[in-house]
Image: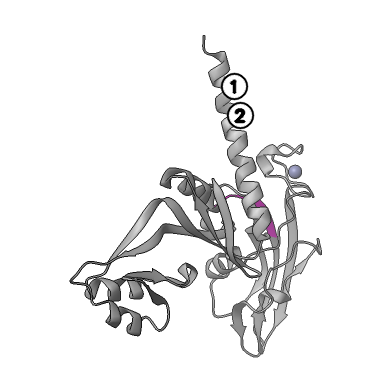
């Protein structure tokens, strides 16, 4: 495999993987999205809620708020020493109290662990009018995207590296003009200037002008966008770690075979 970072921002990374196949890239994608654990609110205990939203709706909204996750300090309940009872190593406790008139934001949640708090402060939860009030205790646990989407740390997608194929029917000058500098002429062929920003609109425009767009099945462009619970590097390292652990289990099985 040959990997190369094409673009990196705080929460998004675009990279290419060469000399591989769709199954391998899809495995990385699935492990990153579905097997890397993060913290999310699992239980809400209401002591007061006379807002316009029912308890269930508020609990659902709270569950979807990304929480900064410290994977070194927390364990999944099933693997914790407390044996499903719940302790400081497998449960994070937060509180939320607010009195109207105001908008309650994710930043109003107070976490017992300063390292694990909402990743963004300005996610609106509910609007309160005068005399309306909410008071609740929240419990967050570690889980994976495979169990529930609220635990998923990221979105990852990929597509085969695009290239353009021209024939004598291709309207190449039209393609160059309409692409706004994204596609340039290289001899009699066309070349994509920046594959990172390649999109379906450009692809459609090429096809309308009889330029065929080919997608490699050996080289891929992957985009990974974090939802804020974990750093991009952590998501990928953790995904590979979980994949390795599963392979080890398989190796053990193979060793037992005679
Ligand atoms: Zn525990």
> Quadrant of the rendered structure where residue 99 is?
bottom right
Is residue 191 at least partly visible in the picture?
Answer: yes
Asked if residue 142 is among those painted magenta in the image, a careful observer would answer yes
Where residue 96 is drawn, which disc sits there?
none
Residue 147 shows in this picture: no
Q: Quadrant of the N terminus?
A: top right
Q: Which residues are magenta?
A: 139-145
Residue beneath label 1, please?
252
Label ID, residue 248: 2
Residue 52 in picture, x, y percent from top left: 54, 80
Task: From this view, report whether residue 113 is shown above or below residue 144.
Answer: below
The Cα–Cα distance between marks 1 and 2, rounded to whole angstroms, is 6 Å
| Label 2 CB-ligand 1 distance < 8 A | no
Tell me whether the residue at label 1 lies in contact with that at label 2, contact meaning CB atoms closer than 8 angstroms. yes
Query: For ligand 1, which image quadrant applies?
Result: top right
Viewer-side residue, 91 vs 137? 91
């Amino acid at each position: 495999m040959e990997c190369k970072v094409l673009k990196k921002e705080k929460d998004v990374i675009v990279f290419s993987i060469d000399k591989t196949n769709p199954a391998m890239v899809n495995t990385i994608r699935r492990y990153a999205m579905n097997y890397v654990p993060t913290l999310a609110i699992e239980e809400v205990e209401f002591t007061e809620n006379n807002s316009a939203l029912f308890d269930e709706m508020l609990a659902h909204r709270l569950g979807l708020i990304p929480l900064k996750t410290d994977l070194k300090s927390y364990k999944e309940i099933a693997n914790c020493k407390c044996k499903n009872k719940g302790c400081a190593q497998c449960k994070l406790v937060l509180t939320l109290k607010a009195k109207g008139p105001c908008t309650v934001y994710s930043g109003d949640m107070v976490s017992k662990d300063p390292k694990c708090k909402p990743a963004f402060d300005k996610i609106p939860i509910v609007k309160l009018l005068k005399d309306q009030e909410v008071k609740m205790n929240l419990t967050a646990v570690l889980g994976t995207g495979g169990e529930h989407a609220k635990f998923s740390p990221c979105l990852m997608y990929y597509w085969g590296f695009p290239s353009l194929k021209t024939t004598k029917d291709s309207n190449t000058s039209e393609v160059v003009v309409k692409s706004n500098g994204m596609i340039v002429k290289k001899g009699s062929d066309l070349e994509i200037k920046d594959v990172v920003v390649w999109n379906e609109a450009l692809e459609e425009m090429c096809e309308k002008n009889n330029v065929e767009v080919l997608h490699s099945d050996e080289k891929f462009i992957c985009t990974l966008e974090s939802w804020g619970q974990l750093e991009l590097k952590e998501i990928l390292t953790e995904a590979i770690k979980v994949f390795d652990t599963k392979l080890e289990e398989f190796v053990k099985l193979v060793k037992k075979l005679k």
